[in-house]
Amino acid sequence: MRRKSRTLTDRELDVMKIVWKLDTATVRQVHELMRIREPKVAYTTVMTLLKILEEKRYLERTPQGRAYVYAPTRPRAEVITDMVKEFVDRVFNGSAQPLLLSLVKSQDLSEEDLDEIAQAIRESE
């Protein structure tokens, strides 16, 4: 049996992006926004995704009338930082250097981008 992951799947991340953007959201609101990119997504699928995110403790829900309102439990930046750390651990055995070198070499970075990266490196020393 496959172990349940605490990290976010692509669809879960899509849902989280919507909830972060709205601050709080109902199933209906998330469903309507998800249908822009994925027109055939079912309402029940969105409801299941929100339930999973609540179980993983990325969301909390509060009753509001006949519906539930979902709110993020962690800020977007914190979740993304954790996802990047997990990726570096899994793919690069915890060393960020190969990832950074790969990104710098494979991306079309402007001088401004490179200066910002260099500044961040200097500040971290």
Image: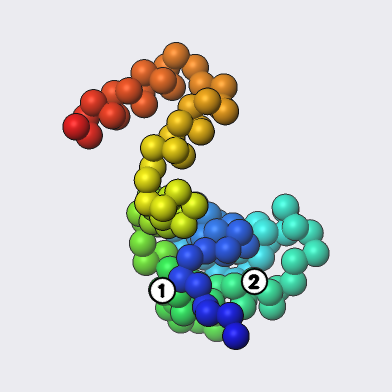
The relative height of residue 61 versus residue 23 in the rendered view (above or below) is below
Closer to the camera in the image, 50 or 32: 50
Which residue is rendered at x = 42% and y = 17% of the image? Answer: 112
Q: Position of residue 122 (x, y in %)?
A: 23, 26
- At mark 1, the secondary structure is loop
Q: Is residue 117 left or right of residue 103?
A: left
**Residue sitting farthest toward the right:** 40
Residue 114 is marked as none
Image quarter of the C terminus: top left
Give the residue at mark 2.
46
The amino acid type found where label 2 is placed reads Val
- Which quarter of the picture shows residue 57? bottom left
Closer to the camera in the image, 64 or 98: 98
How far, Cα to Cα, is label 2 from label 1? 16 Å
Give the residue at mark 1.
57
- Which quarter of the picture shows residue 83? bottom left
The relative height of residue 69 versus residue 76 in the rendered view (above or below) is below
**Residue sitting farthest toward the front:** 93
Q: Is residue 15 visible?
A: no
- At mark 2, the secondary structure is helix
Which residue is rendered at x = 57% and y = 22% of the image? Answer: 108
The relative height of residue 77 versus residue 74 in the rendered view (above or below) is above
The relative height of residue 2 versus residue 33 in the rendered view (above or below) is below
Q: Earlier in the sequence, mark 2 or mark 1?
A: 2
Which residue is rendered at x = 21% and y = 29% of the image? Answer: 123
Q: Residues within 10 Å of mark 1 (few under 14, many from 20)?
A: few
